[in-house]
Each structure stands twice: as C-alpha cells, then as structure tokens.
Image: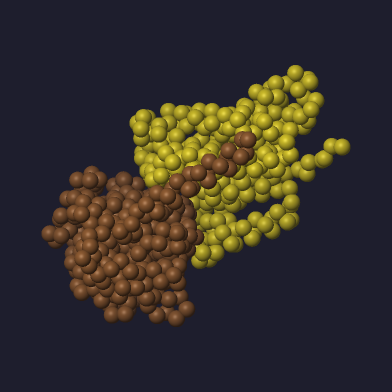
Chain colours: A yellow, B brown
Amino acid sequence: MTYWFQQILNALQLGSIYGLIALGYTMVYGILTMINFAHGDVFMVGAFFCFIAAVMLGLPFLPTLLLTILGTALLGTTIERVAYKPLRQAPRVSAIITALGVGIFLENFTLALAPYPQHIPPLLDNITWTLSGVTFSSLQLIIIALSLGLMFLLDYIVYRTPVGMAMRAISWDKTFVPLMGVPVDSIISITFAIGAGLAGAAGTMYGLAYPVIDPYMGIMVGWKAFIAAVVGGIGNIRGAMIGSFILGTVEIMVVAFFPSTYRDFVAFTLLLLLIVIRPYGILGQPRTQKV
Amino acid sequence: MKKALSLLIPLILVSFSTLGWAAKEETIKVGLIAELTGDMPAVGASCKNAAEMAVKEINDAGGLQVGKKKMKLQLVVEDNAGKADQSAAAAQKLITQDEVVAIIGPNASRYAIPAAEVAESSETILITPWSTNPKTTLDATTNKPKKYVFRAAFIDPFQGKVLAKFARDDMKAKTAAVLYDVASDYNKGIAEVFKESFEKLGGKIVAFETYTTNDKDFSAQLTKIKDTKPDVIFLPNYYSEVPLQVQQAHRQGITAPFLGSDSWGSSELLKLAGNELEGYYFSTHYAADNATPIAKKFIEDYKKTYGNVPDDVAALTYDAFGMLFKSIQNAGKADREAVRNALSTLPGYKGVTGDMKFQAGSGDPIKSAVILQIKGDKFVYHSNANP
C-alpha cells in the first residue's frame, strides 16, 4: 500500500512539472491560436537563468525564482516582438516554422555559452518526512503547491481582470477588437510575458527537482507538456493541468506495472486513444469557424 | 548582385581552405572524433586535450621517427555532437576527405560502434580510447573480431565480472538492484554481465530496472527498487545521469550504497552531484593517486597545460595515441595496412593506464581494472581488480 502512495506522490510531482509548462502552451494557444513550439526552450533558458541567479549571483530561493520569471518574461516578449509579430498576418504554418526556428536558436545559443551540463545547488533545505513508509519531501510539496497556485492565478487573470477580458476578446476576433480600443500589441506582449514567465517558474522548480540542466533538456519535456495540454484541451487552463496530471500518472504507473522500457509506448498509446475518443481534449470545446 | 555575392563567398572560402591542406606534405594525419558537444562534452574535452598533448609532445621533439625520416604529426579534430549518425559521418569524412592514417575515438560505445563500422569497411585503423562494449571490435554479422578496430580500454564483460565480484566479496551484498539506460549499448551490456556474474556468485538480483537516454525522472523505478530492499544498487550509467539518480533515491529515503562503472570517472560527476556520492565505489581504468612513473609524468604534464587532473578518458586517449605512434614507428611507414599489422602485433605496451597487449587476432587489450572510492571531492584508489 505504501508503495502505491509513494508512486502516486511521484506522479503528482511529475504532473506538476508538466503542468507548469503546459500552462504556457495552452495560454498562448488560447489567445492567439498559435502553437509556440519555442516554449520548451524558453523553459530550458529559464533553468539556466535560475543557474545564473543561484550560482553566479548566489541568491536564495525566492529572489532566484522572481528573477528567473522576470528574465523569461522579458525573453518571451522579445521573441514575440522580433519573431512572431511580423508574421501575425502570415499563414499559420509560417509562424509555427518560425517558432521551431526560435527554439533551435535558443538551444544552440545556450550550447555555445554553456556546453557542459550544469548543476543547480539545492536552494531550499530539503526536509523529508516518512509517514508509515511513504517518504515526502518539502520540495515535492512546494512544486505541487506552486503549480496549482499558478494555475488558479492564471485562471483569475484570464477570467476576472480587464487584461484577461481583452485577451479573451482578441482570441474571439482579431479584426474588430482593435477598433473597440483594445491595445492588441500590448495585450499580446502581456500574454507572452505571462506564458514565458510560467516557463521560467517551471525551469526553476525543475532545476531544483532534477538539478542537472543542459541545453537540450527542454525538447522532450516541452513535447510532453504540449501533449498534456492537448489531452486536457488546448486553450483551456484547467484542462492543461488535468492533462499534465494524467500524463504524469500514466507515465509513473506504467513503470510501476510494466518494465520501464514500455513507458512511453504505453503512455502515448493511452493518450492517443483518449484523443480519438475526445478529439478536442478533456475540457476542450470545438472552435466554431466564423464565415 | 547580392545573391551572386552570397554564392561566391563560400566558394572562395572553400578554395582557400583546400589550398591550405594541399600545401602540407611529409606530415602524418591522425583523425580524432570526440564528443565535444552533446550530452557528454566533458568526455570530448578530456579526449581532445590529451590528443593535442600527445601530438604536441612528438612535434616539439621534431616529429616522429619513421624509417629514416622524421615526420610531423597533424591532428584533424571532428565533433560528433553526441550523435551516432554524426560519428559515422565524421569517420567517413576523416577517411575519404582528410585521408588520415588512423582515427582515434569516439569514446562512448554508442558512438564508437557506428564509427567503427565505417572504419572497418574502409580499411582504416580506428582506436577507441574509452568504448568498453564488446560489439565495438566485433563484426556485427559474423561476430568475429574486426580487423581494423582496436581499443585502449578493457571490455564490459570483464568490468561487469569485476564489479559483481567486488559487490559480493568486498561489499558483502546478498541482493542487488540495477538501474540502467536500455537505449545505450554500454549501459545495457554491462548491466547484463553484472546480473549474470552476480547470480553465478550466489547473489540475487531483486530489481532490474531500465530507463531511456535523456530521462530525468527516475522516481517510479526507484520506488520499485526501494520496495525490494537491495543491499547494493548498481548504476552503470553516464556521469551526467548518475547524480540525478542518486539524488532522487536519497529523497525517497533509499539508504543502500551505490556502485558504479567507469562511466562515473569524470571530474564533472562530483560537480554535478554535490556530496551525494560520498563513500561510493566504482571501477575504472587507472587511479591518479596510485600512479606508475609513466602515469605520474603524464598527470603532471597534463596538469601543467590544462590545470586539472586528467580523468580516465584523457589517460586512455593518451595511451591510444602512444600505441598508434609506436606502431607507426614499428611499421616504418605511415601506411594504413602496415600500421594495422604493427598495431595488432604490438609487444607489451607500458601506458598510463597500465601494461597492455592486444589479444591474438583481436582489438581488445589484456589489462586490469582499479576500484576507486569517492571521498570528498576526490577519487581515491581502493584496490586493483581482476575477475
């Protein structure tokens, strides 16, 4: 029994990490209907910002987290201004190709500066408790709490604030909303800043949980988070979180039941089946095409 | 105009660089394939450092005495970017374009195997310093030794046996768990031999868990391992992954000691792991603190040039070059076929990593392993080991 509780705890931690990244994917898609494939690499840069703040500047946890979020938010808006804005009227596939290009640029730029895997020191005292055989760590609880907290914050911003209202308006109609006096450019910048900031938070927490970081770390995690966002219903904030917990649980439980070689094979078969049954994801709504 | 110019510039650059190559004669070209970027850049850097040092030593002394002439050496370095396909492409380029006499590298077995295939089919010598998987020097279809592929390291079956014996006899382990990368030739090979040998010695393998390259979360596997309460956990994995595995195990409250193989032997390991690895043992090729006079000289020269203690990759690369140079001298000419014959019959070579000699008709040397223990920020010599 304790074995299963331990595995569930593992699943919650893994799901929370995916969730933090999936939130960024889903948010940009929800507003711009654009899949920002550079997001996984922004997350990687976030982990490196965390390394810079924690090791080179020697900052404690909270300033490191805030500085990383700020750094990636800036990076996100810069990427949007430089790479995506000129293509806003171009066919969607051009924007996707550009996003892939930005991702490859970020990987290789980081690679040129830091070819070695880097170690992130433990910024928090890691306290572990053992309750009737199940080992908890404070880090696990912080990661789970932070990702849930950020999800609710994001939900609040999008559905309860004027900025959120403007975001939803833009996602509804890009032609007429500017005529109503909504500053489209700044709202889109804010969207990217929040999305990238979430990736920065994810990078920091990931760096603490799995403290060896390298320039290619964002690729696989980014894909998985993207898939989690799709499973949950891309564009839907709570859906992204649910999708991430499902993916985390499936991955961990497959290893718990089968040889670990089957993990990705079984996990992704299950997710594909889920998509076949619910093509728009668990909480997703089909978008009506306006004529 | 702009278009024409952009076409012209690379053309000019290419013609300049080919002119540059053509100007040099009377030199012996040796190729190096190293993991300079990718997932194990520390390995590539050590390899390149040692290679440059080996070549520079000879060139500073006026060149290599071949027959009656002194010939200078030229090192052609290729990066395989930590990829199997690029390793094969690099080997192809060195053989056909740069026309090297021999290739040293790549180091990790998963890159050395494809490069070795290319070298064998183009009849060019390839010496891999660090690859320990038996397949590197064996022909994939006939399972007979390759003719042109050699190595400076011992092989996995040997290392697996040594470690199984160490776990049973020195660590007094009755049960063991293994966690290894199933997608990597090196990790898989050594894990399987360890399992077989440990069971033959009367031990029991209670968990035999796998993951795939680039995984960062091992919590599910570790929870499974924890449930079986092993006396020792064997991690035959690369230095960039071991710290994550050990740290996650400690977070889950696993207290059993870990045991490693020669893939642990990079100074980067300790930087990435903090103090999580204190007291654990691993097997490797040589001990810097228990060195022979030849090794001492190498370690001092290396420290002087690069400012750190050479790891086993550096030592093995240096030995690979040493054996190659000796064979070129013995052959009396820098001809691929002649050097190959001289290398396979090389009489006992005294290298940095000990005495070695190639087994008759095979590219695998006969040599012994050492067991090191991690103490503070150092690898400390524990014992010599033979199965």
Residue A208 picture location, percent across and down: 42, 41
Residue placed at 19% from the left, 72% from the top? B348
Name the quarter where the N terminus of chain B is drawn. top right
Residue placed at 42% from the left, 50% from the top? B19
In the rendered image, the vertical position of residue B122 relative to residue A62, given as above or below: below
Q: Residue furthest top?
A: A181
Q: Quadrant of residue A188?
A: top right
Left or right of A180 in this view: B63: left
- Determine if residue B138 is in view: yes
Residue B241 picture location, percent across and down: 40, 54
Residue placed at 74% from the left, 39% from the top? A91
Left or right of B75 in this view: B139: right
Task: Please tell me which residue lies in front, A159 or A141.
Answer: A159
Task: Please tell me which residue lies in front, B323 or A232.
Answer: B323
Left or right of A169 in this view: B128: left
Q: Quadrant of residue B330?
A: bottom left
Q: Residue furthest right?
A: A291
Residue B292 picture location, percent across and down: 14, 61
Task: Please tell me which residue lies in front, A45 or B176.
Answer: A45
Residue placed at 70% from the left, 54% from the top? A275
Name the quarter where the C terminus of chain B is drawn. bottom left
Q: Quadrant of residue A154?
A: top right
- How many numbered circles are shown? 0
In the rendered image, the vertical position of residue B360 relative to residue B212, given as above or below: below
In the rendered image, the vertical position of residue B2 relative to residue B38, given as above or below: above
Q: Residue furthest left?
A: B293
Residue B21 picture location, percent across and down: 39, 52
- Determine if residue A141 is in view: no
